[in-house]
Image (cartoon, rainbow, N blue to C red):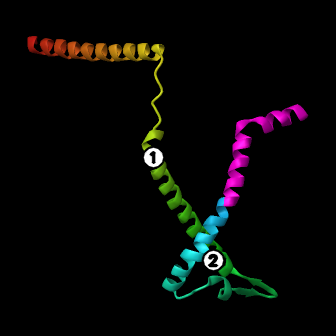
Amino acid sequence: MLKEFKKFIARGNVMDLAVGVIVGGAFSSIVTSLVNNILMPVIGVITGGIDFSEGLTLKVKDATINYGAFLQSVLDFLIIAFCIFIMVKIVNKILGHHEEEKKEETPKKSDEVILLEDIRDLLKEEKKSEKKETKKASKEEKKKK
């Protein structure tokens, strides 16, 4: 079991994931700062300083449901996700990554498949010519009668 664990840890995907989590954590502070210090003040001016987390609550007996805090979290998430999207687009443009490069190539057909398709097409053509000959023969018989 220990050998399997070592093999699992040594795989590239696990190491890539670890690096991604560490870089993501460091990048999180940059995005949070961008949202809190640059975007939210502008959005606050536009929305008139509305903060959903304070005022929107629902009281059920002794419990208080703060659905405003949930709405604020969703709004924050959408803003952060949009910022990350824009930053990734900018970085991809700077680095020259294009979406067109990711087009998948159509899989190459094997020789057997190509041969079978040729046989199928020949059989279809043969059926069509037989139908034409049959129609032609029946028309000639009708004319003779």
Q: Which residue is mark 2?
A: 72
Q: Quadrant of residue 72?
A: bottom right
Judging depth in this view, the residue of 14 and 125 nearest the camera is 14
Circle nearer the viewer, 1 or 2: 1
Residue depicted at x 46% and y 21%: 109
Q: Is residue 75 visible?
A: no
Q: CA distance from mark 1 to mark 2?
A: 36 Å
- Read off the magenta span: 1-26
Note whether 35 is above or below 119 in the view shown: below
- Quarter of the image with the C terminus is top left
Question: First in sequence: mark 1 or mark 2?
Answer: 2
Among all residues in the image, which is located at the extreme front? 94
Q: Is residue 20 magenta?
A: yes
- Quarter of the image with the N terminus is top right
Specify the amino acid type for callout 1: Gly
Note whether 60 is above or below 137 in the view shown: below
Q: Is residue 90 magenta?
A: no
Judging depth in this view, the residue of 5 and 119 nearest the camera is 5
Q: Position of residue 86 (x, y in %)?
A: 50, 61
Among all residues in the image, which is located at the extreme right? 2
Q: Position of residue 93 (x, y in %)?
A: 45, 52
Q: Which residue is mark 1?
A: 96
Residue depicted at x 26% and y 13%: 130
Report the number of numbered marks: 2
